[in-house]
Every structure is written in structure tokens, then in C-alpha cells.
Image (spheres, rainbow, N blue to C red):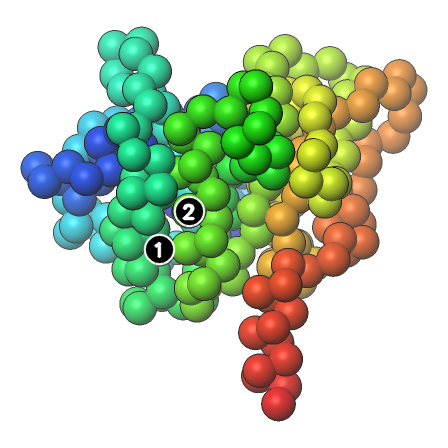
């Protein structure tokens, strides 16, 4: 059994002084699916109520965690999608408030960051937005910390899931495509359940429709990925 905590810090409220962070349903839209799948597999899945989270509450949540799903959110509440005014600042602030805390007190917790494929495409993509800058900063912050990590860059999200959808992982930074929220949840859980092959990897996630095919071996796909430079560099330092 894995104790999984899910956090959806809001970019636009990253620098709030009233709370340590503002938590809402992340942009991936799969928290209920992930929670159901996790519990079906015998894991514990915990997330704070939407709204303000204090330092003490965050510490209580993370005290018994084995893994953290970090799903930053554009959800400004009341159905409003809120972009941060300064993307890099929002990303670094979330990193300081969440990841630095883990790196200091719980460096054993596996962090699965649900990022976005536009971080790979860069600012020249016509759909690039401020929150992609926040995610780029947060990705870098995570790689620079002490915690083991996996970064999943969702492609265009769809709430519709077809049984023929096969999950694919790619390290092509210019990847594009569509992924169902259920497929993204399954990829996140596979990363948590197979840390020996998922840690230190960044991958975009998309679906291929292959009617009649058996379910894809996600752990096997993680094993074929090349670890990020930062993960390889850290291992070289330890080995030396």
C-alpha cells in the first residue's frame, strides 16, 4: 500500500499571505478518477479540502505520505480560470512552499508532477500561456531538490475515455496529441507503483486508439525512457 497525497496549488494565488497555499482541483481534471483507481488498488489517497491550506495542515498531510501528486491549478474558484501575473514567480513560489518543505523534512517522498506538453514546445507555440512558464520553473525546482521525481506532461486533455485508448509515453519535447483524464490518472499511478523505472524521467502522455489491443504496459514504457540529465548527474555524484 502507498500513501498518496494530492495537492492542487493555484498559480494565481501562489504568493498568498493568508494561507500557505490555496488548493483546488488541478487542471488535469482527474482527481476523482485517480482517487478511485488508487483505492481500488489498495492505496490510501488523501487531499485537503479546496481552499486555504495552512503550514500545519500541509505538514500533517505529508507526515505519512509515500508519494505526492502535484497538480498545479488554474482554478480560481467559481468556475474562473486564473492565469498568474508572473509565471516564473508563481512556479518558484509553489516550489519553495511545497517542494522545499519536502526536500528538507521528507526527501524520501516520490513527487509526481503533472505538467503540460507546452512546456516542451516553448514560447513560440501559438497556445503558450503564462502558466506554462510557471510549470517550467516548477519542473526545474523539482529536479534541483532532494526528492525522487517523475514529471508527466499531459497533452490536450479530454474527459472522454474510450476502451480502445492506449497510453503512450514519449520524451519528444515537441510531442502533441490528446490524452484522457483517466489515462493520465493511470500513468500517474503507474509512476508511483513502479518508482524503480519512473524516477528521474520526464515524459509527455498521449493516447492512441487501438481497438482490441491489450492494455499497455506503462511500467515497461517508463523503463525505456532515458533519465533526465539531472537524475543521471545526481547518480554520478553519488557513485563517485
**Residue shown at 23%/54% (left/top)?**
59
Q: Quadrant of residue 63?
A: bottom left
Q: Which residue is drawn at 24% across and 37% down?
A: 14
Q: Using residue 126 as the reference point, say whether residue 221 is left or right of it.
A: right
Task: Return the residue found at the far right.
Answer: 212
Find numbered disc 2 in the image and state the secondary structure of the residue it sits on. Answer: helix
Is residue 192 visible from the viewing direction of this image?
no
The image quadrant where one finds the C terminus is bottom right
Q: Tell me the mark number nearer the camera, choosing from 1 and 2.
A: 2
Residue topped by disc 2: 138
Residue 129 appears in which quarter of the rendering?
top left
Q: In this view, does 142 lie to the left or right of 212?
A: left
Crowding at dot 1, Cα within 10 Å, few <14 / some 14-19 / many 20+, comes out as: many
Counting from the top left corner in percent of width and height, residue 236 is at 63, 80
Residue 57, image x, y percentages: 19, 47
User: What residue is disc 1 on?
Assistant: 99
| Count of numbered marks | 2
Label 1 residue SS: helix
Q: Say if 6 sits above or below 27 in the image.
A: below
In this view, 112 is above or below 179: below
Is 106 rendered above or below residue 97? below
Residue contact at pointers 1 and 2, CB within 8 angstroms? yes
Give percent across and percent down for residue 103.
36, 65
| Label 1 or label 2, whichever comes before in sequence order | 1
Residue at image position (42%, 46%) is 137
Q: Can residue 75 be seen in this view?
A: yes
Q: Which of 172 and 102 is in front in this view?
A: 172
Residue projecting furthest to the left: 18
Name which quarter of the figure residue 120 lies in.
Answer: top right
Foreground of the two, 114 or 32:
114
Location of residue 58 with respect to 168 vertically, above or below? below
In this view of the protein, which residue sits in the foreground, 35 or 162?
Answer: 162
Amino acid at each position: 500500500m502507498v500513501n498518496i497525497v494530492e495537492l492542487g496549488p493555484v498559480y494565481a494565488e501562489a504568493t498568498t499571505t493568508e494561507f500557505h497555499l490555496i488548493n483546488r482541483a488541478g487542471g488535469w481534471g482527474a482527481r476523482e478518477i485517480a482517487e478511485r483507481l488508487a483505492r481500488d488498488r489498495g492505496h490510501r489517497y488523501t487531499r485537503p479540502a479546496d481552499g486555504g491550506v495552512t503550514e500545519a495542515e500541509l505538514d500533517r498531510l505529508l507526515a505519512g505520505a509515500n508519494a505526492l501528486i502535484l497538480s498545479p491549478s488554474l482554478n480560481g474558484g467559481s468556475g474562473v480560470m486564473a492565469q498568474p501575473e508572473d509565471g516564473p514567480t508563481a512556479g518558484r513560489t509553489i516550489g519553495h512552499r511545497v517542494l522545499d518543505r519536502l526536500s528538507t523534512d521528507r526527501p524520501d517522498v516520490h513527487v509526481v508532477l503533472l505538467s503540460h506538453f507546452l512546456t516542451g514546445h516553448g514560447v513560440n507555440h501559438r497556445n503558450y500561456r503564462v502558466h506554462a512558464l510557471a510549470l517550467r520553473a516548477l519542473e526545474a525546482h523539482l529536479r534541483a531538490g532532494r526528492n525522487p521525481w517523475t514529471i508527466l506532461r499531459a497533452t490536450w486533455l479530454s474527459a472522454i475515455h474510450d476502451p480502445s485508448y492506449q497510453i503512450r509515453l514519449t520524451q519528444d519535447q515537441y510531442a502533441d496529441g490528446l490524452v484522457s483524464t483517466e489515462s493520465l490518472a493511470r500513468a500517474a499511478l503507474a509512476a508511483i507503483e513502479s518508482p524503480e523505472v519512473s524516477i528521474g524521467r520526464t515524459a509527455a502522455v498521449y493516447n492512441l486508439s487501438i481497438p482490441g489491443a491489450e492494455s499497455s504496459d506503462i511500467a515497461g514504457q517508463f523503463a525505456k525512457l532515458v533519465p533526465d540529465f539531472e537524475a543521471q548527474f545526481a547518480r554520478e555524484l553519488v557513485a563517485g
